[in-house]
Image (cartoon, rainbow, N blue to C red):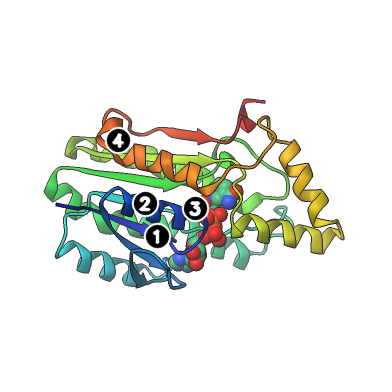
Amino acid sequence: MKKTCVITGGSSGIGLSIVKLFIENDYQVFNLDLSPGTEGDFRQCDVTNLEQVSEIIHDIASQHNIDVLVSNAGVHFSATIENTSEADLDKVFAINVKGAYAAIKSVLPNMKANKQGAIILMASDQALIAKQNSFAYNLSKTALASIAKTTALDYAAFNIRANAVCPGTIETPLYHQAIDNYCQKSGSDKAAVHLEEEKLQPLQRLGQPEEVAELVLFLASDKAKFITGSLQVIDGGYTAQ
Ligand code: NAD
């Protein structure tokens, strides 16, 4: 029988690569995203709408044992604390943090009943280090690392594991949007900024979404059955510097 994976934000970038890899590995994948996805079983969902997240996940859980949750939907936001309005902060938190809260809270009754489950949160290297001009995003990703740890501790007795993946700079639409915004504000040349970004990485290149998907698949599998409450860095050496 196929295993079941629920993912948020599976229509683009890292999430899309995760959906593809899980399908290749015989999972049935439900993708909860704002925008339609090309792969998996798409359920239109705004993760900031806690009631909607709960309804969709309860509907899936009424027919499937949910083996894996990947809480991946997220947005980037570049600004210092002074340039971050309360509305900006609320928006980043509503998507990046409360979206994860809603998804995890909704899958737990099903996972508890089945006495098993793997929860993977898409944090960031910014859960471990700070980057300039990234107040709200940094804060949100640090919060996700905390959610992984508290969930791991509170649900270990139910054989539910929770881990956070901490990618460095990965070449996705979100990355390109962040670079575009930066170039628009600073008047910099995009190709030059991209090259500079690659040079900042010890491995001299950006990560690819498929590489992050492989780590998520591993964490979801029985091969990782003793790994819980951890922060898994995948950043080409960036945070080792
Ligand atoms: P992306 O923009 O390519 O994909 C994000 C997906 O989330 C999109 O499909 C989007 O529609 C969806 N989404 C956004 N808001 C939503 C909402 N309110 N409800 C439902 N879905 C919503 O981005 P990505 O680069 O693939 O990023 C995925 C995750 O990885 C994010 O949490 C991001 O913070 C994290 N991350 C990315 C990088 C990177 O360099 N790209 C690095 C570290 C962490």
Within 8 Å: ligand 1 and the Cβ of disc 1? Answer: yes
Q: Earlier in the sequence, mark 2 or mark 4?
A: 2
Within 8 Å: ligand 1 and the Cβ of disc 3? Answer: yes
Q: Amino acid at mark 1?
A: Thr
| 3D distance between C-alphas at marks 2 and 4 | 18 Å
Coordinates of residue 23 in the picture (x, y in percent): 32, 54
Q: Which residue is mark 4?
A: 153
| 3D distance between C-alphas at marks 1 and 2 | 7 Å
Query: Residue visible at 28% across and 49% down?
Result: 68
Q: Give SS at disc 1.
A: strand
Q: Which residue is mark 3?
A: 14
Q: Earlier in the sequence, mark 1 or mark 2?
A: 1
Q: Amino acid at mark 4?
A: Leu
Q: Residues within 10 Å of mark 3 (few under 14, many from 20)?
A: many
The mark lying in front, picked from 3 and 4, is 3
| 3D distance between C-alphas at marks 1 and 3 | 11 Å
The mark lying in front, picked from 1 and 3, is 3
Q: Earlier in the sequence, mark 1 or mark 3?
A: 1
Q: Amino acid at mark 2?
A: Val
Q: Residues within 10 Å of mark 4 (few under 14, many from 20)?
A: some
- Tell me: residue 137, above or below residue 227: below
- Tell me: residue 204, above or below residue 90: above
Looking at the image, can residue 139 be seen? no
Q: Earlier in the sequence, mark 2 or mark 3?
A: 3
| 3D distance between C-alphas at marks 3 and 4 | 27 Å
The mark lying in front, picked from 2 and 4, is 2
Q: Which residue is mark 1?
A: 8
Coordinates of residue 22 in the picture (x, y in percent): 33, 50
**Depth check, front residue: 100 or 200:** 200
- Tell me: residue 226, above or below residue 63: above
Task: Please give left or right for residue 25 compared with residue 238 in the image.
Answer: left
Task: Please give left or right for residue 213 compared with residue 68 in the image.
Answer: right
